[in-house]
Image (spheres, helix red, strand yellow):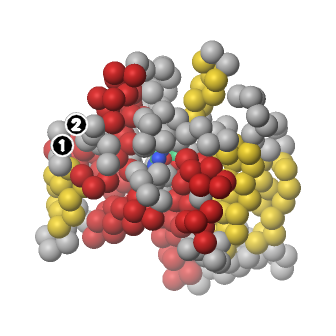
């Protein structure tokens, strides 16, 4: 689901059904690979009256765009297509192609009208991609549903976007952080009633001429992020925040993200940087 695997761990047998049905509902709104989703229709028609939830998530994305000075930008859709990350036919585009796609990028070109719940994309060819935030949001929605049904303990993992509800048979949930360059964990986190997300350049990438090109794009250059961060993990009270922040850290780098992270004093991060000159 949501272009990844979703894992549910709970000793309550109804938990998985609640989680999967809620995530399926969010997919119907936000999945760009489903031609009938609200996001796909918005991308196709350039403007659309959307559900309050879709409007909310686009507003959130615009907030993170502003907070990150443009490092987080859901208008990177045309760049993801260009680099082959949408159809998994990876390629290195020419600078002219990158420049052309860059003209369609910029969340200032998303016009929201809250009075009639409509979204408008200013330029033809613009394309929204909620891949950096939709999983986190879906996990939060599923947690809300679980709580509403009285389920106390459950771990949800949507491709690295995780929520640890309650505990695991009286002990904290243990979440391993993967080594970005080797198989196996770097260490374990013990967590209860918090979200944790990890992003990195090892999840989706291709290597060309000894350089690694990953699916997280720097919207300023139009090239895959090259900040030196190979993996970023953030623990926050909600999964949408941790999801968005880790993507931003990969784009801005450890130092570049410092100022933004100061605005989130309750968020804990682990950032791994590559050794110099290694892909
Ligand atoms: P994540 O796995 O949460 O880091 O999200 C990566 C996904 O976010 C990519 O597969 C794209 O769909 C999308 N994306 C890539 N670069 C950006 C960016 N700079 N801002 C927002 N979304 C992005
Ligand atoms: Mg993310």
C-alpha gap between disc 2 and disc 1: 6 Å
Which quadrant of the figure contains the C terminus?
top right
Please, what secondary structure does the residue beneath circle 2 have?
Answer: loop
Q: Give me the disc on residue 267.
A: none
The vertical placement of 242 against 75, above or below, is: below
- Left or right of residue 79, residue 170 in this image: right
Residue 119 occupies quadrant: bottom left
Q: Residues within 10 Å of mark 1 (few under 14, many from 20)?
A: few
Q: Residues within 10 Å of mark 2 (few under 14, many from 20)?
A: some
Q: Give me the disc on residue 123.
A: 1
Residue 155 seen from this side: no
Task: Give the image location of residue 3, x and y in percent.
Answer: 50, 43
Name the residue at 20% across, 59% down: 111
Please, what secondary structure does the residue beneath circle 1 have?
Answer: loop
Name the residue at 20% across, 72% down: 114
- Left or right of residue 120, residue 148 in this image: right
Q: Nearer the viewer, residue 67 or 198?
A: 67
The vertical placement of 56 against 132, above or below, is: below
Name the residue at 31% across, 53% down: 107
The vertical placement of 244 against 222, above or below, is: below
Q: Which residue is mark 2?
A: 125
Name the residue at 48% across, 20% down: 92
C-beta proximity under 8 Å, tags 2 and 1: yes
- Left or right of residue 128, residue 158 in this image: right
Residue 276 occupies quadrant: top right
């Amino acid at each position: 689901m949501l272009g990844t695997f979703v894992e549910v761990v709970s000793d309550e047998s109804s938990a998985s059904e609640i989680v999967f049905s809620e995530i399926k509902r969010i997919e119907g709104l936000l999945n760009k690979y489903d031609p009938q989703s609200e996001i796909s229709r918005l991308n196709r028609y350039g403007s659309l009256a959307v559900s309050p939830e879709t409007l909310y998530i686009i507003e959130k994305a615009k907030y993170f765009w502003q907070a990150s000075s443009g490092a987080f930008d859901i208008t990177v859709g045309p760049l993801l297509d260009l680099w082959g990350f949408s159809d998994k036919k990876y390629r290195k585009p020419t600078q002219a192609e990158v420049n052309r796609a860059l003209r369609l990028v910029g969340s200032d070109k998303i016009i929201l009208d809250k009075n009639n719940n409509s979204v408008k994309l200013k330029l033809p060819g613009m394309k929204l991609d909620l891949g950096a935030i939709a999983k986190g949001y879906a996990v939060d929605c599923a947690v809300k549903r679980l709580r509403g049904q009285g389920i106390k303990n459950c771990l949800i993992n949507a491709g690295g976007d995780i929520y640890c509800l309650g505990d695991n048979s009286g002990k904290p949930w243990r979440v391993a952080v993967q080594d970005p360059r080797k198989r196996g964990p770097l260490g374990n986190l013990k967590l209860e009633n918090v979200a944790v997300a990890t992003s990195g350049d090892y999840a989706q990438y291709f290597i060309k001429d000894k350089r690694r090109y990953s699916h997280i794009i720097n919207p300023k250059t139009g090239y895959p992020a090259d900040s030196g961060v190979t993996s970023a993990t953030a623990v926050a009270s909600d999964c949408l925040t941790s999801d968005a922040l880790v993507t931003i850290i990969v784009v801005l780098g450890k130092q570049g993200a410092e100022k933004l992270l100061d605005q989130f004093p309750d968020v804990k991060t682990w950032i791994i940087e590559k050794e110099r000159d290694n892909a």
